[in-house]
Image (cartoon, grey):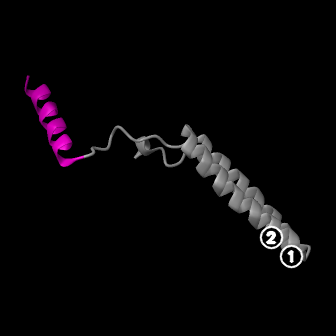
Amino acid sequence: MAAAAHGHTPAAWTGVVISFVGFGIAGVAMILPSVLLVWAGLAVVVAGGVVGKAMSMAGMGQQASTNVYKSVEEQSAAREARVAAVTA
């Protein structure tokens, strides 16, 4: 599972940090009773998602794993290669 990275990328971290700040703004705005600030905080949350996705599309997100086979044939060929290497 460690090869999957689980979102440990600059795109994921940036999106989460921006969204966290937005939730903080919205939370403070609820205490201050400011409807406009609540909406501003929620806009920042959405912006965090957009920025994270844009960074991911720019190549700063998770790359395809080399541990996952694309087809059953590829998996079978890899298994046969491992068996051949062990028996040789």
Q: Report the disc number at residue 17.
A: none
Please say if 83 is above or below 64.
Answer: above
Q: Report the disc number at residue 39.
A: 2
Label 2 sits on a secondary structure element that is helix
Disc 1 packing (10 Å; few <14; some 14–19; many ≥20): few
Residue designated by label 1: 35
Amino acid on which disc 2 is placed: Trp
Label 1 sits on a secondary structure element that is helix
- Residue at the location (72% across, 53% down)? 18
Relative to 84, is 2 on the left or the right? right
Q: Quadrant of residue 40?
A: bottom right
Bounds of the magenta segment: 71-88
Distance from Cα at disc 2 to Cα at disc 1: 6 Å
Relative to 86, is 32 on the left or the right? right
Amino acid on which disc 1 is placed: Val
Q: Main secondary structure of the magenta part?
A: helix
Of all residues, the one furthest to the top in this rendering is: 88
- Residue at the location (27% across, 44% down)? 69
Please say if 40 is above or below 71.
Answer: below
Q: Nearer the viewer, residue 86 or 46?
A: 46
Marks 2 & 1, CB-CB < 8 Å contact: yes
- Residue at the location (61% across, 48% down)? 54
Q: Quadrant of residue 38?
A: bottom right
Relative to 76, is 48 on the left or the right? right
Percent across and percent down for residue 88 are: 8, 22
Relative to 29, is 7 on the left or the right? left
Q: Nearer the viewer, residue 32 or 49?
A: 49
Percent across and percent down for residue 53 are: 59, 51
